[in-house]
Image (spheres, rainbow, N blue to C red):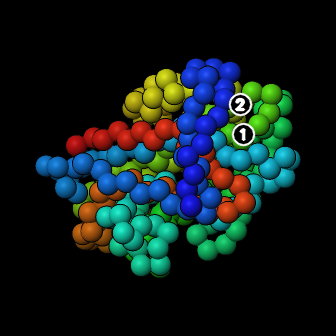
């Protein structure tokens, strides 16, 4: 069951509420009145952190950030109506993100496959596996921190162009508080997170004509780990009609 918690920070705000997910899913319907499925690009950005393992790898199966059709049967369902987004990890097996000390402010980077994905029912279509130097901020350390990541989803009649971004390793020891998160979320293209270009990878899915018949109309975040929670301090959505 998802939990609402509160955490203290050195930087503003000094106390921040969060939504905690552990082997759980968050789904929220978007208001696309007048557009339906006729939009160019949607960015879903998270101001978030991951539980501190205390030095071990962050063992997970997948973190999915994207869009789904409706709220009843999202990405994590074996009867998923339609979901498209960016996946850190593996939809069929467990992988581990590597722990890095970060000068006393730990983060996780490397060790997982990352790719764009489309899921219908229990089956999925994915782009070729790629790699980039992503960074997931860990809780704990000498400075409690919030990190940043996003998924950009563009669509045409036959394709989905999916881009996943996180902050770069160079900025992972610093706190991305709310104003910073909103600032980089609203930058077009590849944003700077704390004055450092985000780590990113773009992949294109071409599942065939009519792939988007079930409209993508809901934010969908899925975190599979039941041991280490994902803490979400804010969710931002940027829409290009």
Callout 2 secondary element: loop
Residue lying farthest to the left in this orientation:
34
Which quadrant does the C terminus fall into?
top left
Residue at horizontal 30%, vertical 41%?
Answer: 239
Residue at horizontal 35%, vertical 64%?
Answer: 71
Residue at horizontal 67%, vertical 72%?
Answer: 93
Q: In the rendered picture of this protein, how many numbered marks are placed on residues?
A: 2
Asked if the residue at tag 1 contacts the one at tag 2, i.e. Cβ–Cβ closer than 8 Å, the answer is yes
Which quadrant does the N terminus fall into?
bottom right
Label 2 neighbourhood size at 10 Å, few (<14), some (14-19), many (20+)?
many
Q: Quadrant of residue 186?
A: top left
Q: Position of residue 195 (x, y in %)?
A: 58, 21
- Along the line of sight, the residue nearer the viewer: 159 or 34: 34
Q: Position of residue 45 (x, y in %)?
A: 47, 41
Callout 1 secondary element: loop
Earlier sequence position, callout 2 versus callout 1: 1
Q: Position of residue 175 (x, y in %)?
A: 65, 27
Would residue 218 appear left or right of 93 to someone viewing this image? Answer: left
Q: Is residue 144 above or below residue 127?
A: above
The numbered dot on residue 139 is 1
The numbered dot on residue 25 is none
- Along the line of sight, the residue nearer the viewer: 132 or 2: 2
Residue lying farthest to the right in this orientation:
55
Label 1 neighbourhood size at 10 Å, few (<14), some (14-19), many (20+)?
many
Does the image show residue 60?
Answer: yes
The numbered dot on residue 144 is 2
């Amino acid at each position: 069951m998802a939990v609402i918690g509160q955490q203290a920070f050195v930087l503003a705000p000094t106390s921040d509420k969060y939504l905690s997910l552990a082997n759980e899913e968050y789904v929220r319907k978007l208001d696309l009145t007048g557009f339906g499925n006729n939009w160019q690009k949607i960015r879903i950005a998270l101001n978030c952190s991951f539980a501190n393992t205390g030095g071990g790898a962050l063992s997970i199966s997948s973190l999915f950030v994207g869009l789904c059709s409706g709220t009843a049967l999202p990405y994590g369902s074996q009867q998923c109506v339609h979901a498209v987004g960016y996946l850190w990890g593996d939809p069929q097996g467990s992988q581990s993100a590597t722990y890095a000390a970060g000068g006393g402010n730990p983060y996780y980077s490397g060790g997982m496959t990352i790719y764009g994905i489309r899921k219908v029912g229990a089956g999925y279509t994915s782009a070729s596996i790629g790699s980039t130097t992503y960074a997931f901020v860990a809780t704990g350390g000498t400075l409690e921190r919030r990190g940043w990541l996003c998924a950009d989803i563009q669509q045409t009649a036959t394709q989905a162009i999916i881009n996943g971004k996180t902050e770069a390793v160079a900025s992972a020891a610093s706190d991305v508080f709310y104003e910073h998160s909103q600032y980089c979320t609203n930058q077009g293209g590849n944003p700077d997170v704390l004055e450092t270009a985000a780590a990113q990878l773009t992949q294109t899915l071409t599942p065939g004509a009519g792939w988007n018949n079930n409209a993508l109309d809901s934010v969908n975040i899925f975190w599979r780990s039941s041991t280490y929670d994902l803490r979400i301090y804010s969710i931002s959505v940027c829409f290009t009609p």
